[in-house]
Image (cartoon, grey):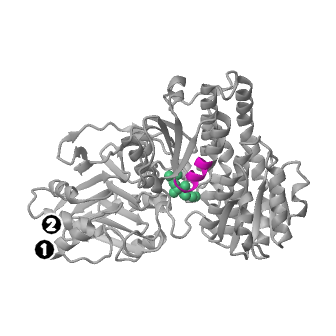
Amino acid sequence: MCGIVGYMGCHEASPVIMSGLKMLEYRGYDSAGICTMDLGAVEIRRSSGKLVNLERLLNEQPLHGTIGIGHTRWATHGKPTVVNAHPHRGGAVVVVHNGIIENYLSLKEELLDKGHMFLSETDSEVISHLVDEKLKTATTLEEAVRLALKDLQGAYALCILSQRDDKTLIAAKSGSPMVVGIKGHEFFIASDMPAIIANTREMVIMEDGEMAVFRNGTVIFTDLDGQDIVKTPRFIDWSPMMAEKNGYPNFMLKEIHEQPQAVKNVTAGRLRPNEGDVFLEGLHLSDRQLLSFERLCLVACGTSWHAALAGKYMIEEHCRIPVDVEIASEFRYRDPLVSGKTLVIPISQSGETADTLAALREAKSRDAHIVSICNVVDSSIARESDGVIYTHAGLEIGVASTKAFTTQLVALYMLTIRLGRANGAINLEKGREMIAALNALPDLVEKTLLLDPQIEEVACEYLTSWDAIYLGRGISYPIALEGALKLKEISYIHADGYPAGEMKHGPIALIDREMPVFVLAPNDRHLVKVRSNMEEVITRGGRVAAFCSAGDEETGKRAEFSLQIPWAGEVLSAVLFAVALQLVAYNFAILKGKDVDQPRNLAKSVTVE
Ligand code: F6R
């Protein structure tokens, strides 16, 4: 959600923090602010709206000092105004915060009684006042922060400065991510690695309940009782180039076009064509262990949930293992039926989604074995899992997930092969066929991307629509859901995905000339039925764009548009249809002049529940 950057070193802090915040703007872009410490005084600049507003302000009123903290906000408590923007100041203490303080109202009341004056509507401001209050009795800032943290309930990643100690910066974490980049005696603190990867690739990943105290070119990590913790920096194997647009007009298009490579990356070193099998290095489960699970439970949010639903279609059909698919935010609160006999698979691009992380912990507390599918290496979900299948899609900055989704589908396909080979549902020959289909996939993704001009025509034709429907059967149903979500997110056109056979049970009432219907009609066993559903729409005056398989001239004949998607086999064609629907949403949004990388109200990586 929000992004945090902190700096302590020998350079002016403000430009370092600003360039870090720019890399994090995709995490939240309602308002932003920076505070630096100079000659024992803190100074703050804040502005509402996107970072350019803050940049403008800093040009007019620059900040000086070699210690500083900054924030880009995705509003939870309080509107996106300047007063609600971080950093927040309470007395001598200044704070930037990511997360939600659940008991902030009761803390605020106590602090009001003690004479503290609040300016914002945020939960975060309470932290600065609380630390300031603790400073009245504590001997050091470090001690005051420690005492304050013990009173907080909820999630936080924090950077804290105080005028009372102009040589110290403190970072703390519980429930929201935080990393510390180290370059000699310079320190870069951030909620996400992309913010600081251009400065250093030596990073310490903080764990819940840890604090980092930066003072005079050193850092000490402690727990909340003040006990030192030894932390070893890791070399992060990401290139700063990943965070550049490389000539594309925006990150979303760049990431859509990275998919052929992303598919190669997720399969790299994992395919065993001769054995008709895959090797998933992070799975850490023998065939015998895999066979011991009675059921699988895939749990995720949003786009990752759509991948999970597609995974159910893959695994149940090819491996004959029961699979439940759970929305993470529901799972946790409904006394879920998981046990030591359940393999729970959280799926998450960021690995930090609060709902998915909470679901993981819930499943763990019920003895489930956890193997996650994650993109971000060493993310919280990855770290808390018993095994991980990384999707290796690379950094995804566009808020609308694209390459993360298609690589999740591929990871699930590989898991299907592994499970099917382990329980014998997939024989050698079929396993080999499935691997061959995977090897062919990157080129087919490339070919699908060439459909862009045709897809742009579709978007032009239906540009004035306020609503759209996506239909699919079998594995195309989750892809229809994902297509609809992409359109909603970035073009603000209301869209719904339905199983094509469900149309006649209600949604067909919506059909008229204003409602384009995107029909997913791959050349699979459902094609005949999908054609009938399409006819039902056309007969009622509906306008259809049909997404068919290459060589199928028949299906789209009565549709207004007929696009031919390469054929990659029954399961993997879903990946190609997903790519085509990403381009549909992208073209709609661009033609409508929308900001595809930072759509309104959204944020990448939802770290609040
Ligand atoms: C949509 C999108 C979101 C995420 C969801 C889960 O384009 O990106 O729906 O899929 O917030 O995020 P992760 O996968 O990071 O857990």
Contact (CB < 8 A) between labels 1 and 2? yes
Depth order, front residue of 9/385: 385
Could you tell me how many numbered marks the image carries? 2
Badge 1, how many Cα within 10 Å: few under 14, some, many 20+?
A: few
Give whichever of discs 1 and 2 has the lower sequence position.
1
**Residue 551 locus on image (x, y percent):** 89, 48
Q: Residue at x 48, y 53 (%)?
A: 328
The answer to whether 216 is drawn above or below residue 32 in the figure is: above
Q: Residue at x 19, y 63 (%)?
A: 131
**Residue 33 locus on image (x, y percent):** 37, 68
Q: Is mark 2 within 8 Å of ligand 1?
A: no
- The residue pinned by badge 2 equals 133
Q: Report whether 64 appears left or right of 549.
A: left
- Quadrant of the rendered structure where residue 392 is? top right
Depth order, front residue of 484/51: 484
Question: In which quadrant of the rendered image does the N terminus lie?
Answer: bottom left
- The residue pinned by badge 1 equals 114
Query: Which residues make up the magenta segment?
Result: 301-309
Q: Report whether 60 appears left or right of 268.
A: left
Q: What residue type is labelled 2?
A: Glu
Magenta span: chief secondary structure? helix
Label drawn at residue 37: none
